[in-house]
Amino acid sequence: MEKAVSSNALKQTFDRRTFVIGAAQAGVGLLLAARMGYIAVAENEKYRMEAESNRVNLSLIPPRRGWILDREGSPLASNRADFRVDIIPERLEDIDGTVRILGDVLAFTPAERQDLHDRLEEARGFSAVPVASGLDYDSFAAVSVRLPELPGVIPQRGYSRYYPTGPAVGHLLGYVGAANREEFDLEPVPLLLTPGFKLGKDGVEKQFEQVLRGQPGARRVEVTARGRIVRDLETREDIQGNPVQLTIDGPLQDYAARRLGLESGSAVVIDCETGDLLCAASMPSFDPNSFSEGIGRVEYQMLREDERVPLRNKVLSGLYPPGSTLKPMAGMALLEAGIDPQETVNCPGGYRLGNRVFRCLGRHGPMTMHTAIARSCNTYFYAMAHRHGYEIIAAMGRSLGLGERYELPVASQSYGTVPDAAWKMRRFEQQWTHSDSLNAVIGQGYMIASPLQLAVMSACLASGKHIRPRLVLGEGPEPGRFSFDPAHFETIRLAMSEVVNGAGTAGRSRLPFPDILMGGKTGTAQVRGLGSGGRGGMGVPWRFRDHGLFVFFAPVDRPKYAGAVVIEHGLGGSVAAAPVARDVLTYLFDPQKGLDVLHALEAGWGGTAQERLAKTYAQYASAAAGIQIAPTPRPPNTGLRPVDAEARAAASAPEADPAAGEALAT
Amino acid sequence: MRRGLTLPAPLAELPWIMLGPLTLLVLFGAAVLQSAAGGDFSTYAASHLIRFGVFLAMALVISRMPRKLVMDGAFLAYGGVLLLLVAVEVMGQVGGGSQRWLELGFLRLQPSELMKPTIVLVLASYFHTMPIGMIAHSRALVVPLGLMLVPMAMVLLQPDLGTALAIGFGGAVVLFLAGIPLRWFAGGAIAAAIAAPLAYFFALQDYQQRRVTTFLDPESDPLGSGYHITQSKIAIGSGGISGKGFGEGSQSHLDYLPEPHTDFVFATMAEEWGLLGGLFVLLVFGIVLRWGLTVARNAPDRFSRLLAGGMTATIFFYVAVNLMMVMGLAPVVGIPLPFMSHGGSSMMTNMICIGTLMMVERWTRAAGTPDY
């Protein structure tokens, strides 16, 4: 029985323990049910959101950028619909393989492959690297079908910025490009990381970024865990950015830029009744179209190495000793100080101050103010400045806009110096000397100004009004009044007319019209200091040659346009700068006549600025990197009113296209 | 005459109270698998149903086996499965990789799977033949522990922690039901508490360690190993009470949920059928397990009782660990959900357990009265 009892005890143990196990199992079951209820009911909202954010991917559609228009409403910058391919470096798995496949499909040259490879190596993962834009549909489709092999590669339909006149507006408008890290840190919005999105990097494009940008569209898509798009859920269209209309005269801007030709320089034209900037050309320049498609490094290197600094906007940032172009302003100051313009000063070829002789360029003999300005006699102004004090001249210079920072929507402007005793003490802790006065009055020494300031000065003299430059149509400072005697302005204008139309220094630059006269003043600014003794003539290297300057206005009898031309190292104002001003004004009054001159010149130079830039780049590329650059394709016929210089002549011809204004909006 | 139905005797004898819900569960599983395959029936669902049919037939064959044959063949079966384990280990070494299965054509046979019911069988047989008075002696523990640890060690070498734990759990439950004094279990628990940290640092592979740390803090690595748990919880949680509807689960269909047809099939189901679907699954498992324990309690002798109890525990282990894993209550171990996950080995093991339980039930009926 011992065994039976024991067996019974074991059976009881078994039953007890079975019950425990059953209870444990039931407990686990309840725990699981409770847990599931908690997840599925109490936390349902949270997990539903997470499932939704898994499933739905919101991708932004870069907004179409607003146009930049010239004063007539023609686009200086518009958008070109294109197919493009970008790479998100973060998702890229194999740089070499991707570059090889893309290079084959898109028929890249070895240089382009190398360039793409370099940019991918340097990419930081956060912003899209543009591979190609402006593709035709076939290339686009060819890339699209190979996407499974190309993680990180994003083909899409988009828009690229298009500047019809290319280099002519490079400095003025700036360019656009993908956001960099600094820009994203400054404005951390997802749009900046969206492939295909470009923001303004310089000039007007940068200043009016928020106006031009527009509202991005959005596409909600259902994606798998690996990022494959399953289907589109909904799409919101983008809203194009607002246009910005400038005071710039597009064809004139193109003409002036091209007329600068092979020189390094700038040309500014201002409507001297209003202050509207009609043209602000700075050459040589870059082609903002290249930048907008992501400039190649070879091209950028070429631009950086050029001693004619194509990356600097010389209109705003170039500072030059104004030289003799200051003489009309100095004359105005003297008139206001009560000098009789008929008073003569004898010019024996120089002016003795103490034991130092300040040289004049010639032995002019007896000079009135009129002849001193016309023949650019330094002695007259040395003597007058010494007698009446330099302060009145500095004050007049400032009234006419020198040394002033203008209220302009530009990224940067240099505003030069109108030196005086206080400035010199502040800057060098030295006393102002009479020598300083004499140097300053002929626009040398410490006196420096930008081409824009010289143009403003000229506009003030020409109109007798307080003119300040305006870049946006209908905005900016209104012309003001001076308390100066209008007769004094007239005296100066006649003297400036004499420079060109009489016995003056710019006699070879008369306008080719019997009834329209140009007034002006030449200037030659020494690059090497006066003290170093060397002159900057033909016989010295380019970078030591004198700058040539010219300020002008026209017509003399009722001034409408004023401006300035500065040719860096152009040897002299009369030989280098005045002819450019003459041709620019000729174009304003008679486009066809101006174009005839330009076309003859360009035939000798080897094409328009845009063509020459492309040619230079091709040469540079083959020399520097041993690569051949394909010729740039001709711009598409967009049906838009063109803004190149030829457009004006064509428009004034009777068979001009009347429908050109009906533009398709992109 | 059961429930008023007139069935042929062999059919009427079947435990429909368990088989009915189980068949429903398998059909439900097939529907979930069809959805997991993007609506395609042939990818997973068809083979799932075929396997259920095949292994159900196998279970019916098992259920007809005589008690003597089973008891006498227990150690033989144990030895055979052990040999198979050695065989895959050797083949894995020779083949230069860790191979866990033998290719049988229609099925990749994992001997470690077979070991789960076999350990229960051999321990039940051992305790049945052991003199009753010896149960409190330490010798009653040494041999069973040896029988358990040898296959566990071999499976761990593969390495397959989940299966090793399943073998250990099945064996431990048989030991518990056999009446091993509780102090041994208390001692074992203390030993495990000491061994666990040591095992974590010295025995577990890198990926296994990561799974444990991830389990303790899934958000620490949401895109790495924590991804599985996080996505599984999102799937279950977003299903709500009634689910998103058949074929509408975004987590599984858009590949966010890993292994939507095997280890995480419950999450796939819960996303589309919601809490109601989950309760249905729990209810069926509850019915099956309760039936199993009832069979064990009613069994005529010690061998059948331990056999039935152990088989029930083996099924329970699968269900509990899998469900705790998908709900974020246990680390990710590769254990599928019985009768729902797509996979032949797990279906086979679980149907062996079911077949064995049916066999014990038949013995009980044949014996008429329990033999105390």
Image (tube, helix red, strand yellow):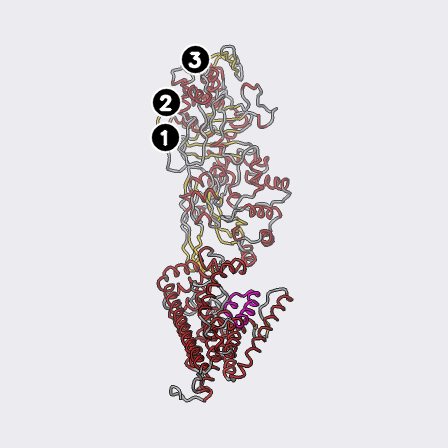
Residue A396 locus on image (x, y percent): 40, 22
Proximity of marks 2 and 1: CB atoms separated by less than 8 Å = no
Q: Is residue A86 among what the camera can see?
A: no
Marked residue chain, label 3: A
Q: Nearer the viewer, residue A587 or A564?
A: A564
Which comes sooner in the sequence, label 2 or label 3?
3
A363 in magenta: no
Residue A162 placement (x, y as % from top left): 49, 45
Please give the count of numbered marks on the rendered protein.
3
What SS does tag 3 mark?
Answer: helix
- What chain is tagged by disc 1? A
Q: Which residue is mark 2?
A: A486
Along the polypeptide, which appears first: circle 2 or circle 1?
1
- 3D distance between C-alphas at marks 2 and 1: 15 Å
Closer to us: B227 or A265: B227
Q: Residues within 10 Å of mark 1 (few under 14, many from 20)?
A: some
Q: Disc 2 residue type?
A: Pro
Element under label 2? helix
Residue that badge 3 annotates: A387
Q: Residue at x 56, y 67 (%)?
A: B153
Q: Nearer the viewer, mark 2 or mark 3?
A: 3
Discs 1 and 3 share one subunit: yes
The span shown in magenta is B143-167
| Residue topped by disc 1 | A479
Up/down of B122 relative to A106, above or below: below
Q: Residues within 10 Å of mark 2 (few under 14, many from 20)?
A: few
